[in-house]
Amino acid sequence: MEEAVRCGTAIAKAGMTLVYGGGRVGLMGAVADAALAAGGKVTGVMPADLVNQEIGHTGLTELRVVNSMHERKWAMAELGDAFLCLPGGPGTFEEIFEQWTWALLGFHSKACGFVNVSGYYDLMRQTVQQMADNGFIAQQYVDMLIYADSTEAALERFKSYVPPPPKWGVAKVEQRY
């Protein structure tokens, strides 16, 4: 929770807009609240079904309501300039792995990073490395992932991020960070 508050604060103080899933609960609610408290802009993207379950954050700069989780992820990908994960559950993994896949395919050239609080992502990092060690992915696509011990360190690394060439040599890239 402490890193969630630091994350929202750091994003706001850097003059960035936080784009996230739109919830008022959990770590992401805390990130949004911290960004707002620090004077930042926060855009949430949430499927109508979740808004109707009353977990949508009502104090955001903007809450975009979409029809499905697929539309949510697409909208967040379009609105975001980079993707940053705090420790989380299966939804966190699913969303960042999709963005990483899109990046290595050249659908975008945005950084994907992890705030590795207390080594939370150490085993995942080893598993991703095992993919390359066993020939399932080229090392350059493993190396494109950013790991940092704090949000501030991750944001700093995002500034110098250079994407590798797309896997199939055809890219639709737009670096906006």
Image (cartoon, rainbow, N blue to C red):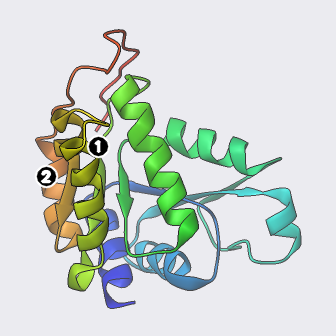
Q: Nearer the viewer, residue 80 or 87?
A: 87
Note whether 144 is above or below 170 in the view shown. below
The answer to which image quadrant residue 161 occupies is: top left
Q: Nearer the viewer, residue 149 or 156?
A: 149
Q: Quarter of the image containing the C terminus?
A: top left
Estimate the x, y position of residue 29 in percent, counting from the top left.
Answer: 55, 78
Residue density around tag 2, few if under 14, some if 14–19, many if 20 or more, within 10 Å: some
130 displayed left or right of 38 = left
Graded by Cα atoms within 10 Å as few (under 14), some (14 to 19) or many (20 or more), the crowding at tag 1 reads: many
Question: The residue under label 2 is which amino acid type?
Answer: Arg
Furthest residue in direction front, as rendered: 134
Please report the residue visible at 56 percent of the width from the left and 84 percent of the height from the top: 26
**Residue 7, percent across and down?**
32, 73
Side (left or right) of 118 relative to 29 = left
Q: Point out the image quarter for the N terminus.
A: bottom left
Provide the residue designation for mark 2.
157
Kindly identify which residue carries mark 1: 111
Task: State the image quarter where residue 90 is shown.
Answer: bottom right
Can I make out residue 80 in this image?
Answer: no
Q: Residue 23 placed where, x, y %? A: 65, 72
- Residue name at image x 71 percent, y 42 percent: 71
